[in-house]
Image: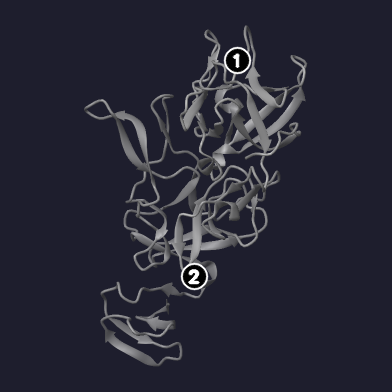
Amino acid sequence: MLSAHAQLSDKGYYRIQNVNTKRWMSLSDNTSTGVDNVSMTADCGALVTKRIWEDVVADPGSIFFIEKLADSSIRPNTIEANVSGQGTSIKELINYTLLITKVGSAYRAWQQEKGQPVMLCDQTAEDYDVSSVITTGDNYAWNITPVDASTNYFGVKPTVTVGGKKYAALFTGYPYTLAEGMKAYYINKVDEARGVAVYKELTGVIPAKTPVLVECVSDNVKDNLVTPVINSAAIPADNAATGIYFCLGDKWTAHYNSTKFDATTMRVLAVSAAGKLAATTATDNLSTVAIKEKDASGQRKTITAIPANSWYLKVSASAPKELTLMSADEYATGITHVSNSTDKHTYDVYTLQGVQVKKNAASLDNLPQGIYIVNGKKVVIK
């Protein structure tokens, strides 16, 4: 599936796959208990390993930025490197950079302070789709392959379809560009009084650590290619969304890092009852994840959580359950999107020329598409 393994460059984006287990690393947490200097082991449970390619290809956590710091004289064909992703790095997790040694066509990632070297290993060679990295065992050979646009690509999996267009909420720790036909927007304002969230388009390099609404080309992940780049643009100062890197609950490694969804104060990407692109309280695209706390029977409790590498909007407790997403241009004109059939109020409707077309109407049914003045506000009927 993947291309031949090239020599590591001074810095670049890579995926890391275990030679024996065929599982890829994914950085899924930013916590660790560090290195145990007595047993010379390290808590690497933040590094989940995944076998199913369809899960890996759309996972930003599977992409690592590897930067060579220096050649190492400890062993031949060895470099000291900083390995980072998801807003953190291996050094931040275990307080050590990695030594990466090329052995044949594969690599070993390790460190040594005293005694025997500590190797990063996949936990088990058994036929599990998901496991995690440990520092003991025999599964220490890894293929490190550059991210590309052909076989080792990263793409966006859309979660929402509106008007034939496909959308996804995306949050990554690296800057990137999008394939032709794709678009990226960020939310720059939430107007609870009007029941809208306003977006602006981003072009060129999408800044690292910026929550975005991605308009995709199709349902096919490979059509929605994302290309990580080295140099980032500035994060928009008026960004109104909160990005989430992690959604992990693993009793085997005791790594729990998730953000519980609170329908009172959070809104997430969805389709409104009127069929519009919106931020709502709908939970269809959210995740169910285990947490540390146990129930009365001793089982781990679960919560509904924001998915990894996604985002949400913070709102007040009095905010409407649905916030229609609209462009900054629409918002500036005072236009509001209104459903023809869901509102139960009465309406006085005028054309933009001041001609009254409805008075005390029970609904907006049968109005031709266009822009009207409804109860004193501009609205668009679609």
Q: Give the residue displayed 73% in from the left and 35% down from the top.
A: 11
Q: Is residue 302 left or right of residue 218?
A: left
Residue 150 image offset from top left, x and y in percent:
67, 47
Q: Give the residue displayed 45% in from the left and 58% down from the top.
A: 160
**66 or 145: nearer the eye?**
145
**339 or 239: nearer the eye?**
339
Residue 227 image offset from top left, x and y in percent:
65, 48
* Residue 97 visible, this angle: yes
Quarter of the image for residue 190 reads: bottom left
Residue 281 image offset from top left, x and y in percent:
35, 54
- Single out the mark in the foreground, 2 or 1: 1
Mark number for residue 331?
2
**199 or 47: nearer the eye?**
47
Q: Amino acid under label 1?
A: Val
Secondary structure under tag 1 reads strand
Query: What residue is disc 1 on?
Result: 118
Within 10 Å of the Cα at label 1, are there few (<14), some (14-19), or many (20+) other Cα atoms? Answer: many
Q: Earlier in the sequence, mark 2 or mark 1?
A: 1
Spatial CA span between label 2 and label 1: 57 Å
Q: Quadrant of the N terminus?
A: top right
- Which residue extends farthest bottom? 355
Quarter of the image for residue 357 reads: bottom left
* Residue 86 visible, this angle: no
Q: Is residue 36 left or right of residue 78?
A: left
Q: Give the residue displayed 34% in from the left and 47% down from the top.
A: 262
